[in-house]
Image: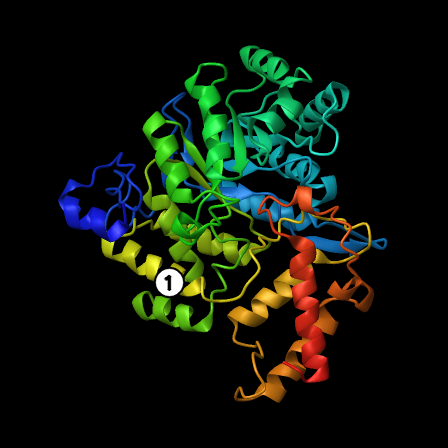
Amino acid sequence: MERRDFIKITGAGALTLGAAAVGCAPKKTASATDEGPEQMVYRENPRNGDKVSLIGFGCMRWPMIEKDGQRVIDQDAVNEMVDYAIEHGINYFDTSPAYLMGQSEKAAGIALSRHPRDKYFIATKLSNFNNATPEASIRMYKDSFEQLKTDYFDYYLLHAIGSGGVAAFEQRYVQNGMMEFLVKEKEAGRIRNLGFSFHGAPGEFDELIGLHDSGRYHWDFVQIEMNFVDWNHADGRRNANASYLYEELDKRGIPIVIMEPLLGGRLANVPDAIARQMKEREPDKSVASWAFRFCGTYPRVLCTLSGMTNMDPLLDNVNTFTHFKPLTEEELEFLERMATQMMEYPIVNCTDCKYCMPCPWGIDIPGIFKHYNTSVTEGRYAQTQEQKDYQKLKKAYLVSYDRAIPTLRQADHCIHCGECLSHCPQSIDIPRQLQRINLYVEKLKQDTL
């Protein structure tokens, strides 16, 4: 059923707090008034009573610095951000052994262990993509305790399952005995909540949630990609619409944790035409706040993760969720129009997660996509020689490309080995997109666009 038809049939008065129909607007939560609560908003996990901050700290994008010729996490900056986050009510921190080339958990453990353990919830993952043997998987699990300086995990996830459906799940977690092991760890209290993060198509989600329905496994929570673009406009062949995932989890009463509320930062840096419309409505609010309010409006959402790289987004997010106002039905309709407009831009659906890295041939895959997407959304994208300021736009793209991406790491060096394909949670045909961008660059250089 189309969103407009649903509204026409039911009317706004029929919308209820637990409504799961695709596109419906939930009522405001008890902790959010028209003026905002002026304190951090918390959602209660109905399964165990945890009071979880509606905004959580995603530890995939810690600030980095150069040290002894290596890119390492800026621990001082991380400590400062974590201190501010906890002081202002953020209590959910999500990490993984795979984040930032294996550095994220250790940095999180150093920063968090300086605070009382009951002041925060730790979420981490079994990220056994490359080696799912029982020995390697158990070693990864146990290493996470050491890195995070804890003796229990509040929320533990099977990392990025979905692609390949139940068959892939069986290979990574069942045939090696890991599900049996993790269930016993939960019974022993070392895992408080067991769930999974999902990337995949609707049918693959149905298979995984079917394991819950059958009673074979019990999912305490599920982490999904949800934002106002992916709500109705995800690639349905390879990735499920968030509206479908939300509905299926909501009707089962399974708490939801949100990842990629900003689509890898793209919803904080929307095209100028869209940003102007948002600022006309909320001149004193950031563009990013629209995306976070969208996620927080839906009551089954337990926590919305934000990968904050410095104090600026942290301050903005704290402000959004300490003066939280759920979106109205009219505002949800407005964001749907903005999402439709965004789909008209020729961007690559990359969220800058860096799971594709390191490329064996040294290609800076996320850097190339980020530079291209930013040029498109900021209107610095030459499309045709008849375009106004074509020569200026052409020169700006080529110069900025060379500055952003070292020559040996640019798209023309991709040999289409396909090593990156299985690692991309967005199921992007990375070699093909690199080829497309390289062709665009060559046309600019040769004036054949």
Q: Residue 439, percent across and down?
A: 69, 70
Task: Judge whether 3 appears above or below 388 on screen.
Answer: above
x%, y% of residue 103?
72, 41
Q: Is residue 444 left or right of residue 9?
A: right
Q: Residue at x 56, y 29 (%)?
A: 157
Task: Decide: is 218 above or below 122.
Answer: above
The residue indicated by pointer 1 is 338
Location of residue 233 in the rendering, given as x and y in whole percent from the top left corner: 42, 52
Task: Tell me the quarter of the picture where residue 253 sits.
Answer: top left
Q: Residue furthest right?
A: 68
Instruction: Determine which quarter of the picture holds residue 445.
Output: bottom right
Q: Nearer the viewer, residue 117 or 279?
A: 279
Disc 1, SS: helix
Which amino acid, mark 1? Answer: Met
Q: Residues within 10 Å of mark 1 (few under 14, many from 20)?
A: many
> 135 and 93: which one is in front?
135
Image quarter of the N terminus: top left
Q: Position of residue 142 (x, y in %)?
A: 70, 22
- Name the residue located 46 percent from the left edge and 26 percent from the top edge: 209
Lateral position of residue 252 relative to residue 173, left or right: left
Q: Is residue 227 left or right of residue 153?
A: left
Q: Quadrant of residue 167?
A: top right
Q: Which quadrant is home to the C terminus?
A: bottom right
**Rendered position, 216 above or below 302:** above
- Residue lying at 42% horizontally and 26% vertically, measured from the top left: 50
Q: Residue at x 44, y 58 (%)?
A: 288
Residue 165 in view of the camera: yes
Can residue 366 be seen in this snapshot?
Answer: no
